[in-house]
Image (tube, grey):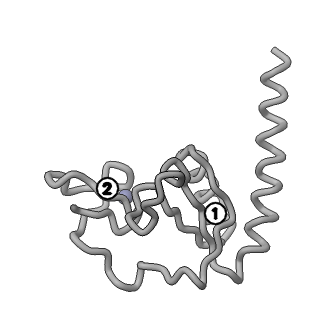
Amino acid sequence: MPLCPNCKYEYVDRATECPDCGQSLVDELPEEIIFDEKDWQVIYTSSFDYEVEMLKDNLESAGITANILSQKDSNFPTPGDLSVIKLLVKTEDAENALNFIEEFKKNLKTDEEEEDIE
Ligand SMILES: [Zn+2]
């Protein structure tokens, strides 16, 4: 299966480019971007990939490298885990990232409350 070296998603055989980021797909991920799990911590999980993508983008614009581990990752075939998408950051960034997400979620909550008033 072709893989996107950027998003790490697998695509159907005839795909040559990642529909998300436009990267050329590869058969195997280059070794340097397969991350070593002990250096990374899961700081957020969600069933909604757009939510995790949004957090990743925001973390990265704050200078924190983040990685998404999706349900499509064959390292995690557990059925109960299928709908969970994990957001990981390096252990050294975990505390900053958690603070960042906390602030971010506060802002989200405010938005939701405003919508409820309508
Ligand atoms: Zn991609």
Kindly tell me whether mark 2's CB lies below 8 Å from ligand 1: yes
Q: What's the residue at 26%, 74% (across, down)?
A: 28
Whether residue 82 sits left or right of residue 17 in the image: it is right
Q: Residue furthest left?
A: 14
11 and 23: which is toward the camera: 11
Picture layout, residue 5 above or below residue 103: below
Neighbor class of circle 1 (other Cα within 10 Å; few <14, some 14-19, many 20+) is few
* Image quarter for ligand 1: bottom left
The residue at which mark 2 appears reads as 22
Q: Which mark is residue 61?
A: 1
Neighbor class of circle 2 (other Cα within 10 Å; few <14, some 14-19, many 20+) is few
Residue 65 rendering spot, x and y as whole percentages: 59, 72
Residue 5 rendering spot, x and y as whole percentages: 34, 69
Q: Residue furthest front?
A: 79
Labels 1 and 2: the sequence-earlier one = 2
Whether residue 31 sits left or right of residue 49 in the image: it is left
Q: What's the residue at 78%, 31% (across, down)?
A: 112
